[in-house]
Amino acid sequence: MSFSSLPTEIQSLLFLTFLTIYLVTLMGNSLIILVTLADPMLHSPMYFFLRNLSFLEIGFNLVIVPKMLGTLIARDTTISFTGCAAQMYFFFFFGVAECFLLATMAYDRYVAICSPLHYPVLMNQRTRAKLAAASWFPGFPVATVQTTTPSSRFHQLKGSTKPSLPAPPTSLLSPCSMYLQASPISGPSQAILLRARNCYHCPTLL
């Protein structure tokens, strides 16, 4: 069941609910960034990583929630191929960067607890900047691979005139559906393939 299949009253209720959560999340993370920057007592490595986490949380929410709210309020469930690919790219980028940053924050707490006397030397400003950069960097290659691979396959699909597999006699499937069944891609990469049916308005009988 998708949002478009729900009654108008429920869609309006969901819109207000998600909008409230979205605004609270943005304000909360923005407040964390401003407070930790304004107060010199909070210029420690722990709050430095917390600012990075808040920034990633803001970016992660900006990728998904605005489009979802637009779908609920405008009842438009389509998205362009470029918009779909861009959304998937930044979804993977912020998600992967956040995972690595959480691991870095765990290491920071480990050093603070196990080596409290050496902590100011080990986690100096240069070291924590390197750790933050190392947390952000893996998001670029992962997002690039996970986005460009299914994108190139769909460009091949769009240019072909015949589906790769014959339609089963018991059901009618669109070329997109047949391609998804035959594709070896699985896991997160297949999400963009599943969503791209809306990009091309592929007719599917469900």
Image (spheres, helix red, strand yellow):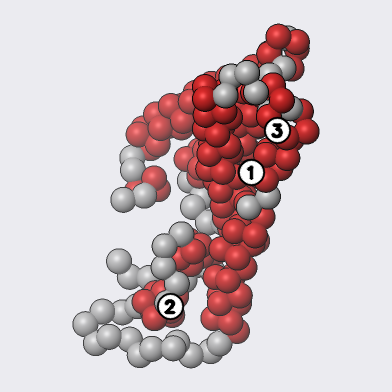
24 up-or-down from 59: above or below: above
- Describe the element under mark 2 as helix, strand or loop: loop
Q: Residues within 10 Å of mark 2 (few under 14, many from 20)?
A: few
Instruction: Tell me: residue 111, above or below residue 65.
Output: above
| Residue beneath disc 3 | 128
Q: Residues within 10 Å of mark 1 (few under 14, many from 20)?
A: many
Looking at the rendered structure, the secondary structure element under dot 3 is helix
Mark 3 surroundings within 10 Å by alpha-carbon count, few (fewer than 14), some (14 through 19), many (20 or more): many
Q: Which residue is mark 2?
A: 183
Circle 1 sits on which residue? 135
Locate the C terminus and report the quarter of the image it occupies: bottom left
Helix, strand or loop status at disc 1: helix
Q: Are marks 3 and 2 in contact (CB under 8 Å)?
A: no
- Residue drawn at (72%, 17%) of the image: 43
Could you tell me if residue 83 is visible in this image? Answer: no
Q: Looking at this view, is 93 or 16 the one in front?
A: 93
Q: Mark 3 vs mark 1: which is more N-terminal?
A: 3
Q: CA distance from mark 3 to mark 1?
A: 10 Å
Q: Quadrant of residue 83?
A: bottom right
Left or right, residue 50 beside residue 194: right
Q: What residue is rendered at 45% in x and 72% in y?
A: 185
